[in-house]
Structures are given as structure tokens and as C-alpha cells.
Image (cartoon, coloured by chain):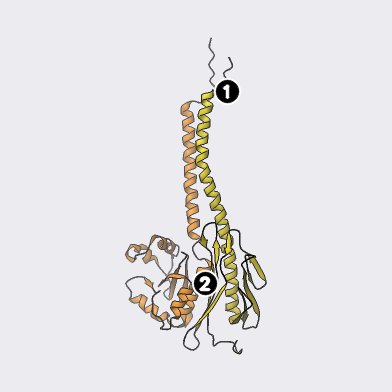
Amino acid sequence: MIKLNNKGFFLVETIAIVSIVAIVLVSLYSQISILYSNYIRNANYNTVESIHAVRNVKKYIEQNYTATLVSDLAASASPLLDIKSYAFDATGYYAALIADSNIKSIYFSAYDINALLTNYASYNINASFLDYLKTLKVSDSKADTYRIIIILNNGNYSNIYLSVADLT
Amino acid sequence: MNKKGFSTVELLVSFVIISFIAIAMFNTIFDLLDKVEYYQSLSKITILNGNVINSVQKDMKQKKYYGSTSCGLNCYDITYQDLSVKRLKTDLIANTVQYGGITERLPSNNVLNGNLVFTTQSFIADAGNNNTILKFYIPIYNEMMDVNNDITIVHQYDSNDLGGLPAF
């Protein structure tokens, strides 16, 4: 009489196990990829260099030009005012400050940028900048507070508050 | 007959499958190892850059800049209005950056690839406003990833505000 050896697994059982393990590994990989890309992206936000650069810009604007920017922002159709090319002074000081600080773009906006995030497509904002702006979303509002947002040439982002109340 | 064990064909098929998987994983693992090494180096250079920038900016803000003198190639003695002096120096051979009493060696794969640059630009400004932009620039190059991790320190000040001290 032939005695059959029934140890081992069916092919179907093996395929089922391999499929389950593969699904678990793919899910883990996708989660780790998201974590990794978030880390890489956030490494460019609020670096020491960009924080000091935006602080320098704020220091310059606070001297004489806050009222100008506030009124220009109020009159502007866009909630984000590009102030890199502003002719604040005729001496070249502002341009030199931007060049020395390796600044690529400077924006002036209200404290609450939620409206900007809702209608970003209307304001010609690229995906990378939009990702940064999303980190600035707020749940409150401050009428006399504004933001200066900068982008450095190396892709670093930073922002700083500018409060009109502090100047009085 | 003893039927335990594997047949030659089964062994060959298993080896072929495992070698395909191993080859596919090698590239991924080597890439990951390179990336881990790069990001470890990046975080170390980011910390070093941050320390240098923060230390100098803190002194500039708290002690107020008075003047600088050259102490040789890639060396400046910065004098503050409390008459304290701190040396900012880079050593291209030792690959170190020194500020005050602290000397830091650059992390591996990062090299000083140029001289320490110190510039001041003066402008006409209203009384009481900043009229001078000072800049220290330390070029640092990451050999592994072919990117620059330069240190840029920009400071604005009023050259007429010397805290009662004579001209430097």
C-alpha cells in the first residue's frame, strides 16, 4: 500500500501567504515613502539662513515702508503682494540686501492666508510654494498683523509676522 | 525510498528566484546607503551652519557691531561696541570654521572651497535708519552630492550709531 506524505503546503496556500505579505510590504513602503518625502520637503522650511534673511527684510521694511505695503495690499486684487522689485529706495539698499541674502522672491500678505489657499490657482503659485503656504494655514485672524514670506535661491522658505501695532 | 529533501530542479529554481530578488535589492540598498550618508552629512552641516550664523547674528544684535580688522588670510577680528573682540576664521587646510573660542571641523564630504569673504556696502539713508549692509560669506562644497552648503551672514546697521565710541 502506498503511504502518501501529506506534509507541506498546497500551492494555493503558498500563493495566498505570498500575496498577503506582498500587500503588507507595499503598504509599509508607501507609508515610509510619504514620511521620507515629507522630511525632505520640510527640511527646506524655516532654516536658520532663511529665518535670518526674512528677519533682515522685516527690519528694513519696518523702518519706513510698512504703511506703504499695507495700503498697497489693501488695494491689490491679489492677497499676495510680490515686493521683490519694489522701488522702496533709490539708493539700491533694498536690492543689495536681497542680493546679499540670496533671496529669490519676497511676498507680503495678511496674517490669514486661507483665502489664498482656497483660490491658489488664480494667483500663479507653483506646487512647491503652495505646499509651504499650506503649513501657514491659521484658524484665527489678526487684523493688524501681516506676513513677509521669502524664498531663497537654494529653495528654502521662511516667513515672519509684521505687526503694525508693534510699530506705534 | 527516502523522499525527504528537494530535487535538483526545485533547488535551481529557488536559487534563480532568490538571485533575481537579490540583484533587484542591491541597487536599492546601495542607493539607500548613499542617501543615508548624504542626509546624515547634510544634517551635520546644517547644524554647523546654524551654529555659526546664530552665534554671529546674536552678537551683532546684542553687542552691536563696531568694526572689523583682518588678521590674515580668511581671518577677521570682529569688534563689538562693548569692545569685545571675536575672531571669525576659516582654515582651508584643516577644514575648520572658528568663531570666538569655538572651532568646528566640517563634516566629512564637506570642504571649504574658497576664501572667507567680508564685504560692507554703505548707502545714503535717513538719520537713525540702517545705512550699511555687512556680509560674511564662507563657501562650503559637498563633494559627494555636488551641492553648495555655504554660510552667508548678512547684518544691517547704522554706521553713525557707534554707541558713543570714536570712529573705528
Question: Label 1: which residue?
Answer: B5
Q: Is B31 above or below relative to B3?
A: below
The chain identifier of the residue carrying mark 2 reads A
Q: Colour of chain B?
A: yellow
Q: Colour of chain A?
A: orange
Closer to the camera, B82 or A92?
A92
> Which amino acid is tagged 1?
Gly
Pick the quarter of the image with the N terminus of chain B: top right
Question: Label 2: which residue?
Answer: A52
> Which amino acid is tagged 2?
His
Assess whether mark 2 and mark 1 are in contact (beta carbons under 8 angstroms).
no
Residue A6 is situated, as x and y percent measured from the top left of the image, at 53, 20
Marker disc for residue B50? none
Residue A96 is situated, as x and y percent measured from the top left of the image, at 46, 77
Is residue B61 shown left or right of residue B100? Answer: left
Is residue A108 shown left or right of residue B68? Answer: left
